Image (tube, rainbow, N blue to C red):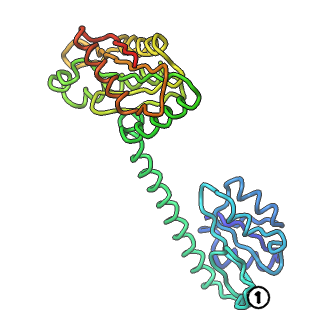
Amino acid sequence: MNILTLVHDSKEISFIQQALGVEDHTLVTVSSSEQAWEAIQAGGARFLLMDWETDDAAGTQLIQRIRASTFAKAVYIFVLTSSTLEDGSAPHGMDDFIHKPYKAAELKTRVILAGRILSLAGNLAVAREQLESHAVFDTLTGFMNRAAFLRQSAGELERSRRASLPLSLIALDIDDFKTINDMFGAELGDEALEVVAQAIREKSRPYDCIGRWTGDEFVLALPGVIGADAEKVAERVIAGVRGTRIEVPNEPPLAVKVSAGIASLARITTSTEIEPVIQQARQAVARAKEAGGNQVFLVYL
């Protein structure tokens, strides 16, 4: 573990290095709180070992600066001190301290414990990020899941209403998806979903709200887009899908096709809600499929 060391006494630094062992830990020494702060900001230090009496940490409020910042990874602050720290003089925000003089074995034990705490904190942070990601995104396509899309698109609807802008909702559905799954299996069905997701990603704007609604259905909320312009977006996606082929063992390549339905709002009122708009777009998809599929059907609301 890299240990950022803010200690001025060279003998103290040598003792710390011998106590911790060169194979297990690397000491990175700095001569001032400002250098320590720069190293922590750069992301190169998660463990700070500092001497409270012989440096400028108290005057520069280094610990308070660290705790007030929102770093991606936790910083463990370990203080060496000659005082008892029982009179209210303990540095606020430190994680642990040890009185001088101290034994090498005690320091090593404390540092090992700190390393375990940092490792646990890192694992918890990763687990939290994964949970948050799973709660928002569809794992196969990377698009927002149904619940997340509902929240996001409702926000887009409200922003469009306040700005007096139009909004279009596109629903996309893979043609004959059940047949693809039944004939070739779920693995190839997933590949078809990925093909459509890639086409949507390439043919839509980076800031468009995109979600996987359910099964083989995708939805896009396009703020500021009305009628024919939304139709062009849907047609670009359909053309992008039409140009792809999926290899099937012992069979001709599979041509995936998709239908699109658009519900377009020129005027949004306070009573307009997103779910009925989505349902109108899904009904428009059904109309496109009834007409033969691989095409767009547009309705104005």
Q: Residue at x 50, y 58 (%)?
A: 125
In the displayed structure, 140 sits above or below 192; it is below
Write down the quadrant of residue 282 in the picture.
top left
Picture layout, residue 145 above or below residue 121: above
**From the viewer's perspective, is residue 177 above or below residue 236?**
below
Measuring 66% from the left and 81% from the top, which residue is drawn there?
97
**With 31 as the anchor, is 25 left or right in this view?**
left
Residue 197 position, x and y percent, is: 39, 26
Residue 114 place in picture, x, y as percent: 57, 73
Residue 192, percent across and down? 30, 24
Q: Is residue 274 left or right of residue 188?
A: right
Quarter of the view holding residue 3 = bottom right
* On-image quarter of the N terminus: bottom right
Residue 301: where, in percent of width, then height?
40, 20
Question: Secondary structure beneath disc 1?
Answer: loop
Q: Looking at this rendering, what residue extends furthest in the left direction?
A: 182
Q: Nearer the viewer, residue 155 or 7?
A: 155
Residue type at mark 1 is Ser
Which residue is at a point 29% across and 33% down the rendered structure image? 214
Residue annotated with mark 1: 82
